[in-house]
Image (cartoon, grey):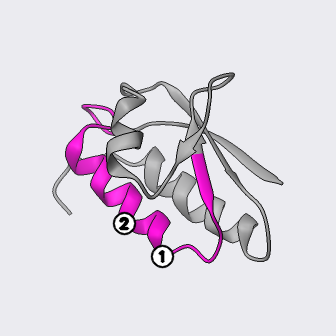
Amino acid sequence: MSERTVAVGSAQGLHARPASIFTEAAKKSPVKVTVGRPGGAPVDAVSMLLVMTLMVKQGEEVVLRAEGAGAQEALDELAELLARDLDAAP
């Protein structure tokens, strides 16, 4: 199993817009990805509602996990995405 820990960069944390962008990217992943707080129960990264229930604020860390072919690349991409401010204009 591959794992990445990343600090959330979005100014408002993982609220609606950043959670939507993240879950849409996770849906394109070739592997199942979970996300959760360190030491907490992980949730399915493709569920916007479940991701939002984590109530992650800017600067807080989350743990991404995936297993299978393409897991490393998927986690690299998703970790890079979460580290950015997804509230900022594109």
Around disc 1, counting alpha carbons within 10 Å, would you say few (fewer than 14), some (14 to 19), or many (20 or more)? few
- Label 1 sits on residue: 28
Q: Position of residue 50 (x, y in %)?
A: 40, 41
Depth check: give the residue in front, 90 or 18. 18
Residue that appears at 27% across and 33% down: 11
Q: Is residue 85 above or below residue 80?
A: above
- Mark 1 touches mark 2? (CB < 8 Å): yes
Considering the numbered disc 1 on the image, is that residue within a helix, a strand or a loop?
loop
Depth check: give the residue in front, 14 or 10. 14
Report if residue 86 is visible in the image. Answer: no
Is the C terminus in the top left, top right, bottom left or bottom right quadrant? Answer: bottom left
* Numbered tag placed on residue 24 in the rendering: 2
Q: Position of residue 34 (x, y in %)?
A: 60, 49
Segment tinted magenta in the rendering = 10-34
How many numbered discs sit on the rendered protein? 2
- Determine which quarter of the picture holds residue 30: bottom right
Judge from the rendering whether residue 34 lies leftward or rightward of residue 4; answer left or right. left
Judge from the rendering whether residue 64 lies leftward or rightward of residue 53; answer left or right. right
Around disc 2, counting alpha carbons within 10 Å, would you say few (fewer than 14), some (14 to 19), or many (20 or more)? some
